[in-house]
Structure formats: C-alpha cells, structure tokens
Amino acid sequence: MTDLLYSDVEEDLRASVRDLLADKAGAEALLARVETAEPYDLKLWRTLADEVGVAGLAVPEELGGHGASAREVAVVAEELGRSVAPVPFLGSVVLATTALVHAGARDFVGKLAAGQAIGALAVPLSTAPGAGFPSSVTANPDGTLSGRVGTVADASVADLLVVPAAGPDGPGLYVVEASAATVSELVSFDLTRRVADVTLDNAPATPVASGPAAAGALEQALLFGAGILASEQTGVAEWALTETVRYLKGRYQFGRPVGGFQSLKHRLANLYTDLVLARAAARNAADALATGTDVPISVAVAQARNAPIAVRATEEAIQLHGGIGMTWEHPAHLYLKRAKADEIALGTPGKHRARLADLIDLPA
Amino acid sequence: MTVTAEDLTRQATEFLANHDPASTDRMDFLRARFDAGLAWIHFPAGLGGQNAPRALQSVVDEVFTAAGAPDNNPRRIGIGLGMAAPTILAFGTPEQRERFLRPLWTGEEVWCQLFSEPGAGSDLAALGTRAVRDGDDWIVTGQKVWTSGAHESQWAILVTRTDPDVPKHQGMTYFLCDMTAPGVEVRPLRQITGEAEFNEVFLTDVRIPDTQRLGAVGEGWKVAQTTLMNERVAIGGHVQPREGGLIGIVAKTWRERPELRTPELRDRLVKHWVEAETLRLAGTRLRQQLAVGAPGPEGSAMKVAFSELNQALTGLEVELLGEEGLAYDDWTFRRPAIVDFTGREAGYRYLRAKGNSIEGGTSEVLRNIIAERVLGLPSEPRVDKDVAWKDLPR
C-alpha cells in the first residue's frame, strides 16, 4: 500500500539537511550572494554531497550511490525548497543523474553520484513529461552534436551535460563536457536556480543510449523531476506559511497583533489547508516513483495541485507581510520567484491537467 | 501482553466456528460477538472489547465480513457508535456502561444527539435548555434542533443548562435522555432539498432520573467536548478508492455523455478531479498517521476542503447537464434514514452539499480553529467569557 508518511530514516535525513542549511544557507547569506558572480553556493553543495550524500542518494549501490529511493530524494527537495538553497540539486541529482541511471551510463553516474562532477539535463526547464523527444540538437555523422537548447536548469555550474539529440537513426542520449559547449546564463527570474542557454557547435559527445532506450531515459528523468518538484513546492509553501504566521504574531497595528484579525487568520488557515493537500500529493508522487506503480497519474496530480499551491502561498506571504514583503531585503521574493518558476518547470499545471485528462479517460 | 493481529484473527475464526452466521439469529449473533470482546476491540473487556489497539479493528471486521456475518448496520447507528459510546465509556458509571453499551453496539437501541438549539449553533455553549433538580429527578424543558434520527431513536445524549447564574461554560450538565419519555416531541425539519433528514425536538417538563446524568453536575461542557472530539474522529471515515466519491459520478456522466462536453467544463472537471484525488490522499495519509499513533491536526482542514469541493463539483454537475439541470427529481416531503448522495440526482446533490460547510462545524469556525489551535494565532475576543449565562445578550 502507498506509504504517505515519513519514515524515521527519512526524518533523520531531513534533520541533517535542515541543520546544515540553517547553518550555511540563511536568508542573509542567500541575499548577499544572488547578485555576485557566484550565485550558486558550491561549497555548500560539496558539503551536502560529502556529508549527507545527496549527490548519489537514489543511485543504486552497484553504480556508486546510496541505494535510497525517490522518497528520500523528495525529503531533501522539500528541505531545499524550504531554504531555496542555491545548489544544483534539481539539475544534477534529480534530472541528469536519473537520465544517466536509466541509460545505464555507469561511469558518468559514478562521477555524479560521488559528487566529483555536476550534471545538467540539456532540455528547456519547461519541458513536461510526455512532451516527445526534442529535436533542437542534432547528432552529426562524425558523432559530434550541434544545436541550441534554451533555459537549461543549473547548466552554468555543470561539468557534464546530458543531451538528447536527434540522430540519423532516431533519438539518442549523449554526454557532453560542459567545456565543449557554450553555456550562457540568462538573467534568470528565479534568483536561486539559474537557467542558461546551451549552444553546441560540433561538440564532441559520448553516446550513452539510443532509440527507445534514450527516449525512455529522458521520459523517466522528466517524470522523476516533476514528481520530486512537488516536494520542493511543498517545502516552499511551508516556508511561506510558517514565516508569515511568525511575522503576523509579532507585527502590531491598531494595538493588536495583526495575526489576530480574522480575515488574516482565515487566509492563513486556507494556506494550511493547501499545505495538508500538497504534502499528501507530494508524498504520494514520491512513493509512486519509489515503487514504480501508478507513476504518470501520481506525478500529474502532484504537479497540477502543488505548483499553484506554492505560488499562492508565496503570493500570500508577500501580501500578508505588507510593505516589508515587497522589499528586496526580505527573503519572501526569493520564494515567490522560485514558486513562479517552478510553476513553469517540468510542465505547467495546465499541461499536467491536460495529460492527466487523457490518463484518467476524461475525453474532450 | 498486547493483542496481535494473529490473536484477533484466531479469536474471530474460533467465534465464527461456534456461531454459524448462516444459522444464528442476527441479534443473538451480534450479542454473542459483543460478549466475546470482538465488537469494538479497543473497548475494555466485558464491554465489547479487550483493550486491543484500535488500529487492529479492521482485522476483526474483515474476518467477519469475509464469513458473511451480519453487521450492526453502522450507518444506521452512527451517532451511538461514534459519539454516545465513547462518551459513556469515558464518563459513565459502571452501571451506565453495563446498561447502555451492549444494546447501543448491537443496534437494539438507536441513539441521537440533542446538542444544537435555535439560539446555540456555532456557539453551542450558549445553549439554554433548562434542567431543574426535583428530588431524584431532573425536569428538562427546551428546544433542540438538527437532530438526525430523533424519530427513530430510543435514547439521546443531551446537554442542558443547570446553572444560569455562572458563565456559560460552567453551568451545563449532560444527560442520557429516554426519547420515549413523556414530554419529548419530535417534529421533522424540512430542508431546501424538500426532505427532512433532521428534526426539531421539543422537551416539555421531561423527567430524567439523576441516574441518567453523565458526569458531574456543571461538567456538561467537558463531557460534551469528549463527544465532539469523537465526532471529528468518526468523520475520518474509511479508505476511499480513486473516484470513490462524488467525482466518480460526475466522471461517469462525462464519459457516457459526449454531447454534454465543452472545453471549459472539461478544464474545471479535471481541476475538481485533481482536488478530489488529493483530498483522498490526504485522508489516507491522516488514517496512516492514526494507525501509527500519531494523529495530526489535519482533520479540520480536510473538512473545509471537502465541503468546498463537494459544492463546486455538484454545481458543475448541474451545469454540465444543461437542460436536464432545469428539472429536479422530487420535491416530495420525505424522511430518508441516511443521506444518500448517490441515490438521488444532480439537483439534490447540489442542494444537499450546501449543508457540508455548515454541519459538523461551519467552515468559518473551522478556519478559526485551524488558525488558533494549529497555527497558534491569537484567539477571537471572548466578550462572554466572564458573564453569567442569564445576562448574555440574545
């Protein structure tokens, strides 16, 4: 039966990630970093990889990982969402590593799982599961790749790019050294997860899967990503609710705590209700990914529900904080930007609903 | 030694071997099951249980169901099982537990709840039905409302005002009231659906022996809290399959009636489907928390979400039906034994769902509860807290 709770092991994992993030990724440090030349905190990333083992968390032990499952990855995603930590978890662990595991690319998986390299999956971050194999990159007869992919998550800190490309014999999945590509980071809407354009011009590439295996590996990575993202969105929404409640208890106007006004209490109660649902949907998606049962529906439901919940929670956080919520110095905007970008990431809620309608037989 | 699932399976199997469901009289069977401690297993020995973990109840139930054994028709006696029984167990004297729990569980005696009044809805503690001491009895006069099953009940749990001179929470006393006693008058309360699931109950000089008082004089609020806490637990319900609720009905109509479909309705239907599925998962999660002994505070939130979904979904269903939505199945006054969302048509469901955000705590009160008790936000001002009940504005 589907297990929607957190195990003791998962709670321990959560505690160690949370402690680390509280220590090293506080709001002030985050804000100080976003406009520097190093928006990613790669030192923190290495600590997460070395001390907690997040890089190879769900990688099978025989491939050099920790042999955990989507359930543990989801717990880490929740905590990273709660702190909007600027680390390449989604791009490297969730997307690139998953694609390579499904492609059976042992050596590359080993590097990523050990935290020796950072990966990125060279598809636009907005790509939804079931989108069809991309054709923006072409495999040349000499084995090199050419083409351009926009808005690739975490590509600007990646060492390895996992690139789906259309070859003469159909879909292929390749690994390209980032140094062989032109990666230019965009001015990203989400300040704590950057997107970059990747241009390949006869770039040397290592093929890791072809034909249906390549398409399957890509689809598995996208499903995994969309399902795990629902946990990140839960973490983002939980931060927004917790922080807004905390603020409104201490903020006095008209001689009373603002949090005592019933109109605000009811809005916060609605956010709590959203969060109860988001957590159930996220846990269900994580458990489905871990057991391999009912995956497409569970993932579509979780994305359709949780993306809007994270957006609403962060929008409410801005409004209910009043003026301070509109300032650059308060971290609320980092969460709003993450939530809004996450709404587009790996398929909008509308796309997931459209896919779901087909999966559950509600025809047009 | 804690009882295990294996122990219970063995007990139930042995019981069935000695009491063939096919040849045993239904009531004899139920009484024997109660006496064997296989009724509500978390109750004490001698009162239908054996102090077993509540989470294992389903183990026993499944053995009985698989054997085709008669059940106690739990939907018919839901108020007795869910509200009266736990309160009698918590506050009853040994004599009261002995007298009431067995016929309650077997369904020989049906229970109803006399709590709400025309002047005490969300503010239940403002209730004014008076109970005045008269020797070994109490004389009760007042009006109760929204009593489901009153016309079919032998007994009621009743909260009264025994001391009007103290603040409202202090002056209440809880009774077990014989619904066949002189002075009890039950009148149907017709709803916007045309039917009457509920009643008004008029109590005029009803004589209740002091031996039917539950808990101490003046402690009625504390006793009532136990009842209401258990109501929330009972609402938790059973594990639903996907599309198990109203959404399944609307989805079926959608699949069978292509001529009704529009893109806009489809988008709304899929949104509701997602909401229904997410709520189902949240309900499953809540039950999993209960099963491991870690109940969370999510129940109030789920009830708010559930009523909003039901209202939106039933509204969509009427709209989807178009012309047919202009007809109603039947306005004839009737008295259904149980609410049947599935046995009636879309218009009925739409109207009945309006009650979902009122019954069992209005959504507004539940939001206050979430904000105050879960999120720890400041309480609403309580201007009536230190005022004698008789001096409250009304």
Image: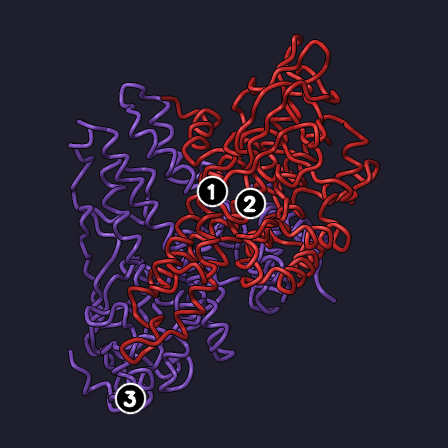
Chain colours: A red, B purple
How many residues crowd mark 1 within 10 Å: few (<14), some (14–19), many (20+)? many
The numbered mark 2 sits on a residue in which chain? A
The numbered mark 3 sits on a residue in which chain? B
Vertical side of A255 occupied by B166: above or below: below
Quarter of the image with the N terminus of chain B is bottom right
| Pointer 1 and pointer 3 on the same chain | no
**In percent of the image, x 68 and y 36: which residue is there?**
A119
Q: Amino acid at mark 1?
A: Ala
Residue at mark 3 to residue at mark 2: CA–CA distance: 55 Å
Q: Is residue B31 left or right of residue B209?
A: right
Q: Position of residue B171 (x, y in %)?
A: 31, 86
Vertical side of B383 occupied by A174: above or below: above
Is B70 in front, or is A10?
A10
Is B119 in front, or is A52?
A52
**Earlier residue among tags 1 and 2:** 2
The numbered mark 1 sits on a residue in which chain? A
Q: Is residue A20 left or right of residue A152?
A: right
Label 1 with label 2: CB-CB less than 8 Å? yes
How many residues crowd mark 2 within 10 Å: few (<14), some (14–19), many (20+)? many
The residue at which mark 3 appears reads as B386
**Which corner quadrant of the image does residue B78 belong to?**
bottom left
**Which corner quadrant of the image does residue B377 belong to?**
bottom left
Is A71 in front, or is A328?
A328
Q: Is residue B13 visible?
A: yes
Q: Is residue B25 visible?
A: no
Q: Position of residue B35 (x, y in %)?
A: 58, 62
**In percent of the image, x 71 and y 53: which residue is there?**
A48
Residue at mark 1 to residue at mark 3: CA–CA distance: 52 Å
Tell which residue pokes out farthest to the right in this image: A62
The residue at which mark 2 appears reads as A193
Q: Is residue A165 left or right of residue B268?
A: right
